[in-house]
Amino acid sequence: MFLVSFLVLNTADNPRQLGNNIFQAGSIAQKYNCQLTRMDFQQEEGLMSCLPLGLNQIEIQRGLTTSSTAIFVPFTTQELFQNGKEALYYGINALSNNLIMVDRKLLKNPNGLILGTPGSGKSFSAKREIANCFLLTSDDVIICDPEAEYAPLVERLHGQVIKISPTSTNYINPMDLNLDYSDDESPLSLKSDFILSLCELIVGGKDGLQPVQKTIIDRCVRLVYQTYLNDPRPENMPILEDLYNLLRSQEEKEAQYIATALEIYVTGSLNVFNHQSNVDINNRIVCYDIKELGKQLKKIGMLVVQDQVWNRVTINRAAHKSTRYYIDEMHLLLKEEQTAAYTVEIWKRFRKWGGIPTGITQNVKDLLSSREVENIFENSDFVYMLNQAGGDRQILAKQLGISTHQLSYVTHSGEGEGLLFYGSTILPFVDHFPKNTELYRIMTTKPQELKKEDE
Ligand SMILES: Nc1ncnc2c1ncn2[C@@H]1O[C@H](COP(=O)(O)OP(=O)(O)OP(=O)(O)O)[C@@H](O)[C@H]1O
Ligand SMILES: [Mg+2]
């Protein structure tokens, strides 16, 4: 049994408004069979008791049992507020208005997903996290950007945007060899493995490379790096053409066959990858813009980007540094079998290498297209869920076991509103980013706002 004083403080800008407010409060109470009494001659004591001073000067008390009292205790919402140095901001708790500060590195696995219908604020929240982690942590950031929308942010942070397209003059050399891998495996074997996959994509029909072809490629790869290994200066780094020439000079007819298949990428029209690197791939924040990668180059381009990402993660692991990898429009990668397989691999192995991948996609359905891809969904402990389409909500309710009430936070919700899943914690969040800021201007994708900016 508790003795309780229940006080309601009404405020307003003028007496008339105040009268209205008091009337309204009274009618709400009446609806629940309660009657509010005005505190005549005790206004000041009433005000003092309402202030958070822990001082009750009103002696009107009522007897309530525990369960009735509990209704008045407002501190039963779940909170996510971590004090760590690397905790980042993810919005405001929609129930209690407290900040949500979270460090994904403290999760069992830091893999993340951002899901939501078009325009719900997925890319925006990814950009906000990138800016936040750029300023607060020392992690490296890599972005795979199929819509060419991250450039303003990346450039503002003095990062490197690498535009990969048949007409671009930004080059990355897929043959780049990194000698400071402090891994057990030799750098050359790793590279040879990558070049085999590359040739497999280029040459391989249905059955992939024949054993003889593999031997020849491996032999040539070892030869082509001789000069560089003897004298590791950047100018000595081989390019695809050197490999091509070596293949041409081999006796076997299989070598000629591979060389011919490679030709279009060396002297032909798809020769983007036949140049020395001329971009700073070691910048702290690197964005691969693959919007204009044509159909022909898509698979190869993705393979090269993927190789770059693994390179960076390997180097960073040795330096005990985390690497964040953002994949926007991930459904594009999940459509192709080969790129889907890499993505799944990232979700399975990245954690051990200090990597933090974040996938951004519109529909949960994309993630349930095959058993393999489903693993991505199941292996993500961090899910930032924005407004969801009807069909997806049903799937989510079943897969994640969220209640109808929780689903209401992702039903017709506004930009930057939704549900946050952090391990086993689920909370509704709201993040209304102020629009009069420079950060907002470089992060928005609304055509009308971009147009205004241009003018
Ligand atoms: N948290 C937010 N606060 C304020 N405005 C926001 C917020 N999130 C998104 N917006 C607004 O919504 C617009 C669209 O967001 P965003 O580009 O992230 O969409 P998207 O979900 O990535 O869509 P798509 O699937 O088409 O890529 C932004 O340009 C911005 O103006
Ligand atoms: Mg987007």
Image: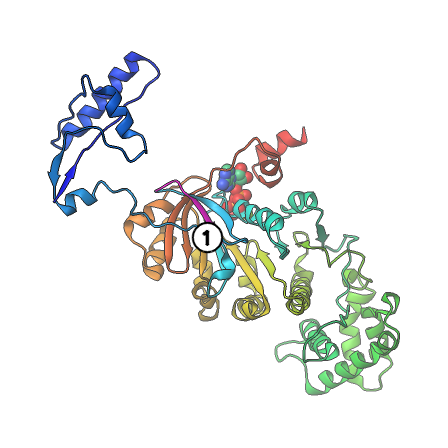
Is 429 located above or below residue 368 in the figure? above
For image coordinates 52% across by 66% down, the residue present is 347
Quadrant placement of the N terminus? top left
User: Does ligand 1 reach within 8 Å of label 1's beta carbon?
Assistant: no
Q: Which residues are magenta?
A: 96-102
- Along the line of sight, the residue nearer the viewer: 48 or 409: 48
For image coordinates 63% across by 63% down, the residue present is 321
Please name the amino acid that badge 1 sits on.
Gln
Query: How far from the left and from the top, in percent, is residue 407?
Result: 33, 49
Is 204 located above or below residue 450 in the figure? below
Query: How far from the left and from the top, in percent, is residue 277?
Result: 80, 60
Residue 101 colored magenta? yes
- Quarter-of-image position of residue 242: bottom right
Query: How far from the left and from the top, in percent, is residue 21?
Result: 26, 20
Horizontal relation, residue 32 to residue 324: left or right: left
Query: How far from the left and from the top, in percent, is residue 424?
Result: 37, 60
For image coordinates 45% across by 56% down, the residue present is 383
Quadrant placement of the C terminus? top right
- Quarter-of-image position of residue 365: bottom left
- Along the line of sight, the residue nearer the viewer: 237 or 40: 40
Is 265 located above or below residue 430 in the figure? below
- Along the line of sight, the residue nearer the viewer: 109 or 454: 109
Q: Which residue is mark 1?
A: 82
Residue 65 colored magenta? no
- Along the line of sight, the residue nearer the viewer: 77 or 304: 77
Q: Secondary structure at mark 1?
A: loop
